[in-house]
Amino acid sequence: MSKVLYVDYDRCNGCELCALHCSFAKTGTFNPRRSRVQVIGWEEKGLFVPALCQHCANPPCAPACPESAIIKDGKTGTVSIDYATCKDRFSCIPACPYGAITIDPATKRVIQCDLCGGDPVCAKVCPIGVIQFVEEEKLPVKREAYLEKYGETLASMPGRVVKEGSR
Ligand code: SF4
């Protein structure tokens, strides 16, 4: 059984603990802007959605990179950036259907969830279990349906530039 990320965003309260811990795990600083999880808020609607890489079966960011710096691990399913190959062209950013590739304001390099080597810290620290890392067979809904709704919701958030229809 392979584990996948599941974001039960209807219950997210926007506390950003996930982003703070992700930032600390990856950079040693508590700065949500340096996190691989970006908690997007739509305050009028009381809606908060943590945007993070869903490690697509066929990640559209990979062919968008002219340097082939985005790697899909065939064994673990993890999508990651090969920083030795990446030339900071940023063409992966608009290709992501979840807006989950961002730029670290300190390093000016693209950043994206790498599943923390198979034990994502965001899923461990969310106090109400919004971000889950679970066996695909145990998801409460079909993964395709979840991904479609997750992508549509993120695309509808004000100020978001995410590519629709590429899932
Ligand atoms: S820690 Fe959980 S509740 Fe808080 S912002 Fe992250 S996903 Fe939402």
Image: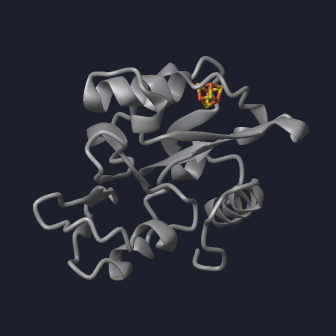
Query: Which of 50/137 is in front?
Result: 50
Q: Farthest residue toward the right? A: 44
Residue 103: percent from the left, percent from the top? 39, 51
Query: Which of 130/156 is in front?
Result: 156
Q: Farthest residue toward the left? A: 84
Residue 9: percent from the left, percent from the top? 71, 40
Q: Is residue 134 above or below residue 111?
A: above
Q: How is the image coloured?
A: one colour
Is 122 on the left or on the right of 147, as rendered? left
Residue 22: percent from the left, percent from the top? 40, 30
Q: Is residue 26 visible?
A: yes
Residue at 40% x, 72% y is 61
Q: Is residue 129 above or below residue 118?
A: above
Is 128 on the left or on the right of 74, as rendered? right
Query: Which of 76/125 is in front?
Result: 125
Residue 92: percent from the left, percent from the top? 39, 70
Residue at 73% x, 26% y is 13
Report the image quarter containing ligand 1.
top right
Is 12 on the left or on the right of 64, as rendered? right
Q: Farthest residue toward the top? A: 127
Residue at 50% x, 46% y is 135
Q: Quadrant of residue 50?
A: top right
**The C terminus sits in image quarter:** bottom right
Q: Quadrant of residue 12?
A: top right
Q: Is residue 1 visible?
A: no
Residue at 57% x, 67% y is 97
